């Protein structure tokens, strides 16, 4: 025979209350752990965000020139400023290439046009003007004055900007004396203004038929790649 043992009601109530207390305590502990974990996660995320390096501010490189910069006869994406942009992007350099080339531009025209372009921030200024002056036989002294005036305007507006001069030469048929006077302009201005100098932008391209378009003056796509390399060798160290 089995016997059934009945416990007084007050004992059952005590046991029930004890179980409820234990479960409540367990829930509080679990909730506390969960909140602690969530708070720690939030703290860790906040710390990571605070310690993460700030994204580099994009800086502007203004390529100021004539048809050689503009990429005459080609798309702007094939001109050397765009090729240099590709090089900078591949290296993760925070610079934006701005092509301000204008076909037919002389140094006098550039002196008048530069003010409008300086409305935007300029961190690096690349000056490529003078070729059209040479082809027109403009006196080298005048070309020099105009180039210096352009540089002065850039330095006045953005004194911290880095400056690059792209040198140019004229064909021998312009006369030996004229060619010599013209060639030294760019070096003189570069030295005077602490500018990085590319002695001759068209080095490796000028006079090579396969690298120039039908006019024999403006580079082909392959020619523009060489121009980009000529400029990049001088530009990269200062970026």
Image (cartoon, grey):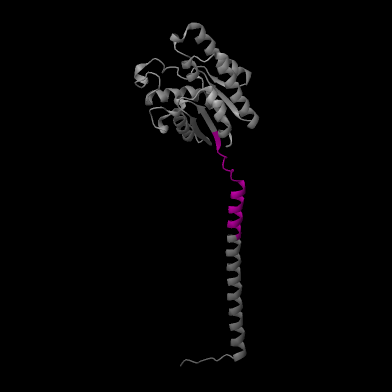
Q: Quadrant of residue 33?
A: bottom right
Reply yes or no: does residue 52 show up in magenta: yes
The one of 128 and 178 positioned closer to us in this rendering: 178
| Residue 142 point in image, percent of width and height | 57, 17
Is there any visible trace of residue 159 in the rendered image?
Answer: no
Q: How many marks?
A: 0
25 relative to 219 in the view: left or right: right
Which residue is at a point 38% across and 29% down the rendered structure image? 74
The one of 45 and 152 positioned closer to us in this rendering: 152
| Residue 34 point in image, percent of width and height | 57, 64
Which residue is at a point 60% across and 57% down the rendered structure image? 40
Reply yes or no: does residue 56 show up in magenta: yes
Picture layout, residue 12 above or below residue 180: below
46 relative to 92 in the view: left or right: right
The one of 108 and 93 positioned closer to us in this rendering: 108
Furthest toward the top, the residue is 176
Q: Quadrant of the C terminus?
A: top right
Q: Which residues are magenta?
A: 39-60
| Residue 76 point in image, percent of width and height | 42, 32
Is there any visible trace of residue 155 in the rendered image?
Answer: yes
| Residue 24 point in image, percent of width and height | 60, 75
Which residue is at a point 54% across and 23% down the rendered structure image? 108
Q: Quadrant of residue 114?
A: top right
Q: Quadrant of residue 127?
A: top right
């Amino acid at each position: 025979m089995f016997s059934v043992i009945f416990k007084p009601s007050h004992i059952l109530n005590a046991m029930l209350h004890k179980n409820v207390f234990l479960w409540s305590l367990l829930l509080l502990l679990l909730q506390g752990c969960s909140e602690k974990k969530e708070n720690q996660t939030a703290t860790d995320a906040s710390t990571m965000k605070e310690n993460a390096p700030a994204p580099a501010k994009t800086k502007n490189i203004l390529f100021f020139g004539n048809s050689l910069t503009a990429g005459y006869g080609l798309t702007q994406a094939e001109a050397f400023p765009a090729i240099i942009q590709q090089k900078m992007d591949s290296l993760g350099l925070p610079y934006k290439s701005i092509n301000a080339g204008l076909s037919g531009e002389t140094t006098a025209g550039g002196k008048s046009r530069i003010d409008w372009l300086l409305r935007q921030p300029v961190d690096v200024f690349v000056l490529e003007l003078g070729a059209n002056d040479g082809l027109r036989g403009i006196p080298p002294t005048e070309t020099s004055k105009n180039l210096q005036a352009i540089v002065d305007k850039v330095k006045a507006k953005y004194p911290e900007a880095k400056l690059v001069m792209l040198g140019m030469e004229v064909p021998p048929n312009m006369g030996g004396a004229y060619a010599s006077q013209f060639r030294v302009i760019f070096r003189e201005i570069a030295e005077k203004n602490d500018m990085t100098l590319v002695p001759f932008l068209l080095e490796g391209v000028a006079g090579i038929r396969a690298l120039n378009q039908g006019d024999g003056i403006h580079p082909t796509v392959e020619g523009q790649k060489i121009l980009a390399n000529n400029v990049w060798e001088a530009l990269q160290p200062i970026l």
